[in-house]
Image (spheres, helix red, strand yellow):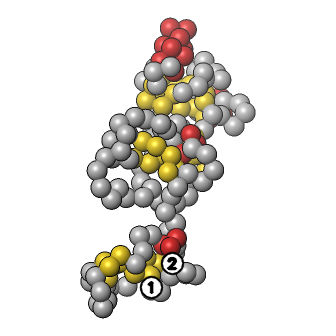
Amino acid sequence: MTARVYLCAVLLCLSGCWSSTEAAPGRNFTVVDHCPGKLMVVPSSRGCVSDRDCTGGHRCCVFDCGAVCVPPAFTKPGVCPRRKFGAGVCAEYCVNDSDCPNNEKCCSNGCGHECIAPYTVKPGRCALPKGTPMCAEYCYHDGQCPAEQKCCPTTCGHACSEPC
């Protein structure tokens, strides 16, 4: 990597270089580590071809200014909550889950991204919807249901039920 490209990477660090490898937002999976979506730190190496060229557990990640060694980003377990109405603040408060404290995830708020406590997703699948005496939302996510029960759709809302 030339000094000019490295300088570009460092200067664009302030405005944020986008990575060519981004995790799909809103998916329920845990990745030990991956390349960050934006270059937000000064790279630890001027250039690399693979992760073996990097030290200190850093990853060789490709940004718009070339490949550099950077600390990896982490995807935390859980699922970003669905927006119930409207849009949130149109600002980017985070880029990856690594930017968020504790167990919070970097989630879309309808316009930008912010750190939000994730929904809990329990194992198993919901059975076909069953009728309920009232149309109501008894739960919004699995974390609101006891033991192994999941928040499953009914014919008119959602309720906790045993997974199949």
Which residue is farthest right? Answer: 56
Q: Which residue is mark 1?
A: 161
Between residue 95 and residue 19, name the one nearer to us. 95
| Residue 20 visible in the snapshot | no
Residue at the location (52% across, 66% down)? 120
Q: Position of residue 130 (x, y in %)?
A: 31, 89
Please, what secondary structure does the residue beneath circle 1 have? strand
In the rendered image, the quadrant that contains the C terminus is bottom left
Q: Earlier in the sequence, mark 1 or mark 2?
A: 2
Residue at the location (38% across, 47% down)? 109
Residue at the location (36% across, 44% down)? 88
The type of residue carrying mark 1 is: Ser
Specify whether 118 is left or right of 71: left
Specify whether 103 is left or right of 132: right
Distance Cα–Cα, label 1 vs label 2: 8 Å
Residue at the location (46% across, 43% down)? 114
Residue 125: mark in rendering: none
Q: Position of residue 13 (x, y in %)?
A: 51, 21
Q: Position of residue 89 (x, y in %)?
A: 37, 40
Please, what secondary structure does the residue beneath circle 2 have? loop
Between residue 138 and residue 13, name the one nearer to us. 138
Q: Is residue 52 above or below residue 134?
A: above
| Residue 55 visible in the snapshot | yes
Q: Are marks 1 and 2 in contact (CB under 8 Å)?
A: no
Is disc 1 surrounded by few (<14), some (14 to 19) or many (20+) residues within 10 Å?
some
The type of residue carrying mark 2 is: Cys
Q: Is residue 8 above or below residue 96?
A: above
Between residue 102 and residue 75, name the one nearer to us. 102
In the rendered image, the quadrant that contains the N terminus is top right
Q: Position of residue 75 (x, y in %)?
A: 55, 49
Q: Which residue is mark 2?
A: 145
